[in-house]
Amino acid sequence: MSINNSDKQKIVVVGNGMVGHHFIDQLVKNGGGDYQIVTFAEESRLAYDRVMLTSYFTGNTADDLALTTPDAYDEQGVEYHVNQQVVGIDRGAKTVETASGDIISYDKLVLSTGSFPFVPPVPGKDQPHIHVYRTLDDLDQIAESAQSSKIGVVIGGGLLGLEAANAIKQLGLTTHVVEFAPRLMAVQLDQGGGDLLRQKIEALGVSVHTEKNTLEIVAGQDCRYRMNFADGSFLETDIIVFSAGIRPQDHLARINDITLGERGGIAIDDQCVTSDPDIYAIGECALWDNKIFGLIAPGYAMAKAAVSHLTGGDKTFKGADMSTKLKLLGVEVASIGDAHGNTPKSQSYSFIDSATGVYKKIVMSRDGKILLGAVLVGDSNDYGQWLQLALNSIELSHPPEYLLLPAMDGEMSSAGTGIDALPPAAQICSCYDVSKQALCDAVAGGAHDIAALKSCTEAGTGCGGCVPLVTQVLNSELAKLGVSVDHSLCRHFEYSRAELFDIVRVKKIKTFEGLISECGQGDGCEICKPVAASMFASLWNDHVLNDELVGLQDTNDNFLGNMQKDGTYSIVPRIPAGEITPEHLILIGEIAKEYNLYTKITGGQRIDLFGAQLHQLPPIWQRLVDAGLETGHAYGKSLRTVKSCVGNNWCRYGVQDSTGMAIILENRYRGVRSPHKVKMAVSGCARECAEAQSKDFGVIATDNGWNLYVAGNGGMRPRHGDLFASDIDDQTLLRYIDIIFMFYVRTADRLQRTSVWMENLEGGLDYLKEVVINDKLSINDELLAQMAHLKDTYQCEWKTTIEDPQKLKRFSHFINSDKADDNVTFITVRDQINPSDKFALATEL
């Protein structure tokens, strides 16, 4: 039994899914210190991202999907109980009872119990290997069944059904979708859109069966089960996943006489209060205006309304737009408003491009001025603009057909007006209910780039579909504020790094003097000179210590080693994939011992030697190069390492040769100069021992090839990489990395990691896929040729240096002398040297 001794108002939240967690998050942000918050989760884990469930089969772990952690709740003062089902409510005593018999009091109760999968009453549905698709536990059971199966069937062709089909396909099973309606996504799409979606999905290897009513599930002849249909046909399968819709989880309200709708759902008002004034209901269990909302954005809006009412605010829930944009099995699909043209006297216009597989339909008002609804399949780029036209009833400035026509030179693709025509209350981000006004206020408050705008408003951090519109608002507001977004590299060049890169590339400029003469002024500075050096290296790949380039390099590149805080340098030979022979290992040990160097095995799976003085670098590298080792470029803004596990050569879980692929990647991209350092990793299975998703380029083995992740980062602001492509072969993997790497080199800002580059790339991951996979900009051949040039002209910079007496002259502390720098002294810590100014902490701890 729990007794409330606190003076704080006690809020009990039943259900810790996405909406329940969002309620807690909002309450904590809006005076959470005034409340004692308790939450119950039926599952074994706290809230996680159900929208991304399918990614569980493409490399994401439960931790990756987690929206919170026990530590985070502890820090916020939230009491949580997992594996605890609430089975009863005593409204008079204001307590809840758990399945284990605990009684917990409340001042206010929030029901966020969500929904449960609807399983039609088909005879045979309760047999083994027949599942639903709702939780991570469900996915674990599906994965277990898949190990002994070859064919999988999903019953249901709606949003969740196609997500489930994607999951089945990711597991390597022959996949079928069975749908009762005459088309897929019958709620969102018209017949034309449904037909094209079917064609695209079948082209991907998923069989679609529409207008099928399953009568029974019996034992199969060639597979585990046989599904018999009402039309006399049948389908054999080993696994069946039901995804035929959801029903509100309203049992607690039902047994406690809280008002429900005729067809279920807990009835709520605009403040999300139920018929009991001390009980709220939010999310998929709640019924507002006789409507159940099965998307996450309305649930978040309900959570905010409930928090507002609880804390004395005036925010209300007035329903939600059910427009949808998503990618199903790689196919872009979007639906807006009245997609079926049910509005009396509405007019419909359609556009079909059979060559590219694009279908667009718009539903207009009778006078043709207001967009009421739309369907997009194959290309959803217009979704953001069209959604705002529909939501805000903005009159078109051109005839409706202009919305469907491809843009002409100098014209916008949309017949609507620009972002300035949207009213302040226009919702830009539906995931977090961020209005245009909120974005404008944030820009006025100092958020002058996309990353800052995301951070302070959360806009664009959910599904990411609103980022293009958020960018438009940002640019428009900056212009109104008179803020000149100056992308000049420095005072010597009135161009951004990307613009300068194009100038250097097109005009084939190879010296800094030539660049200044062409488009700059003055003598250059510590900003533009290293940038120019990097661009020259990325394009022409001449040795960085050549006479015309050496003066441009920063300290590390100048001496081909990382300068440490005591003025000594590190020595880092390349050890591709961490694979090293005993002979090389012994050599490194002998050198470290002879020169008394501090030795450290790094997280990048190589060996760093610290404490070498400048004059010692050439003889040390002479020995390393003579033995066949080469520079690891630890000093350069270039590829650092390609980390790997042992893969299927040794590990019983490995499904591909991750070590071999890592060596291929490291030897291919070694020495490629870029705007910032680049890290890669290859994991031999989904267990992800190489931590590939935290790298700029991450590769994870699958049974069918490789999954490629891009723009990950494990630094001060960690970012999981985005899944770029699945189940690709070796050749495709290398082609995609070649193009992405060179596109990043060409377009990124100075010292911009791939993670920030991706976040600022207008159109984000989808745009990058268009550029790389579909050659949207028609530059792929050029990018591939540039990478091939860098690969073919690679040189170990230390090998070239020690062969050139002129270059070796710079490696001495004193002119014409190999004398050591007497100012460099060391102390001994754990039997190795350390800089002498190190605090005397290590010997005592």
Image (tube, helix red, strand yellow):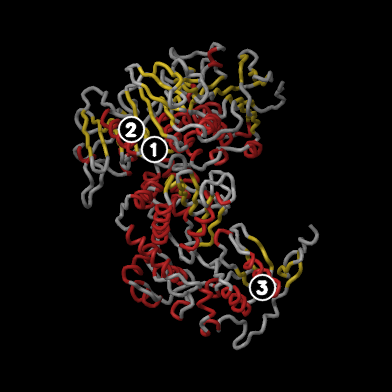
C-alpha gap between disc 2 and disc 1: 17 Å
Residue visible at 62% across and 72% down in the picture? 569
Q: Regarding mark 3 in the picture, which secondary structure is present there?
A: helix
The mark that comes first in sequence, 3 or 1, is 1
Disc nearest the viewer among 3 and 1: 3
Location of residue 91 by image quarter: top right
Q: Are marks 2 and 1 in contact (CB under 8 Å)?
A: no
- Of residues 120 and 334, the one nearer the viewer is 120
The mark that comes first in sequence, 2 or 1, is 1
The image quadrant where one finds the N terminus is top right
Q: Regarding mark 1 in the picture, which secondary structure is present there?
A: loop
* Residue 774 seen: yes
- The percent position of residue 546, horizontal first and vertical second, equals 46, 79
The mark that comes first in sequence, 3 or 2, is 2
Q: Is residue 103 above or below residue 527?
A: above
Residue 613 left/right relative to 165: right
Residue extending farthest to the right is 844
Q: Regarding mark 2 in the picture, which secondary structure is present there?
A: strand
Three-letter amino acid code of the residue under disc 2: Ser
| Residue position marked by numbered label 3 in the rendering | 591
Q: Is residue 205 above or below residue 280?
A: below
Disc nearest the viewer among 3 and 2: 3
C-alpha gap between disc 3 and disc 1: 54 Å
- The percent position of residue 141, horizontal first and vertical second, equals 54, 30
Q: Residues within 10 Å of mark 1 (few under 14, many from 20)?
A: some
| Residue position marked by numbered label 2 in the rendering | 335
Three-letter amino acid code of the residue under disc 1: Leu
| Residue position marked by numbered label 1 in the rendering | 329
Residue visible at 53% across and 22% down in the picture? 280
**What is the count of numbered marks?**
3
Q: Is residue 712 above or below residue 262?
A: below
